[in-house]
Amino acid sequence: MEYKDYYKILGVGKNATEKEIKQAFRKLARQYHPDMNPNDPQAEARFKEINEAYEVLSDPEKRKKYDQLGADWVRWQQAGGQPGDFDWSRWTTWGTGQGPNVRYATADDLRDLFGDSSPFSDFFSQIFGGMGTGRARTEGFGFRTRPQRGQDYEQDVEITLEEAFHGTTRTLQRDGERLDVKIPRGADTGTRVRLAGKGAPGIAGGPAGDIYLRVKVLPHPRFERKGDDLHTTVPVDLFTAVLGGEVRVPTLEGDVLLKIPPTTQNGRVFRLRGKGMPRLRKPDERGDLLAKVEVQLPTHLTAEQRRLFEELRRISG
């Protein structure tokens, strides 16, 4: 993530007064306002940058935090630290809700989802997003204030394979509001669940952003998931493998009986249709369960069993 030098963006010193910061902002905002530069993406990008800098430096609480971060950043550089290795996580403000690994959507995420429409940079969102944002700073210029869509948030959630099979819920806290989120049947690692309008509030009457839960399905001790199919290994004793019989095969809904034909070879795979995972958008449809036979040789033989095996070897040539 790129460090933003807000003092440099506004062209003021680090000891600038509130009045000096406001004067610098008004001058630059008038110059680069989109209404004065229609269809000029560079001017619009510059205006967003100026507005973001003023959003921080005009707020005493944000400015104090930014100055502390800046001092930490300078010490890191002076010590020879590489920008890409700087620990931003301890400066992140949002993430007091339940659940692990809360983070803001990155600029790349936003571009992938909505195009370059976010009013604030990834740096601002990570460091100051949870402190709230004001409306676009265009008061007093005679310009109309453009509505801006609020920032999106993204959070990772971990669920078990059983929860992915049956569907589950997670509870979040957002600004004192309890949010019960349904994770649908068939969810897989990478599935995103959207909470519309629960992100950051919009600017100047714009719509609120969204919250996205990004699902991670935990490994299972018995099953391996591949798409909507499940794979498992089934132990089969030697006698059943040779003579045929039935074995119990576990599924996520309980055991089922599998018929083993005589002389079944080790490693043979049986497909149990419809015993896999529900399909995400068609939960009434199911993948398959593929059961791989693992023939278990006896480890202790009685004298009689050994004699019979030797006889079998003899008559088999």
Image (tube, rainbow, N blue to C red):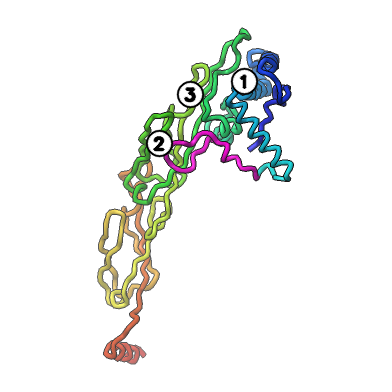
The local secondary structure at tag 1 comes to loop
- Taking the spot 56% from the left edge, 27% from the top edge, the residue there is 118
Compared to 298, does 112 lie above or below?
Answer: above
**Residue of label 3:** 201
Measured from the top left, where is residue 209 in percent x and y? 48, 27
Give percent across and percent down for residue 260: 29, 69
Magenta span covers which residues? 85-105
Quarter holding residue 88? top right
Where is 242 relative to 46, above or below?
below
**Residue that numbered label 2 is attached to:** 172
Task: Check the picture and name the quadrant holding the C terminus.
Answer: bottom left
Query: 97 or 19: nearer the eye?
Result: 19
- The mark that comes first in sequence, 2 or 3, is 2
C-alpha separation, residue under disc 2 versus residue under disc 3: 17 Å
Q: Alpha-carbon distance for marks 1 and 3?
A: 20 Å
Marks 1 and 2, how far apart in space?
32 Å
For label 3, the SS is loop
User: Can the viewer see residue 32?
Assistant: no
Kindly identify the amino acid type of the residue bearing the numbered disc 2: Leu
Residue position for label 1:
58
Task: Pinpoint residue 148: horizontal percent, then vertical percent.
Answer: 54, 21
The secondary structure that dominates the magenta segment is loop
- Identify which amino acid the numbered label 1 is placed on: Ser
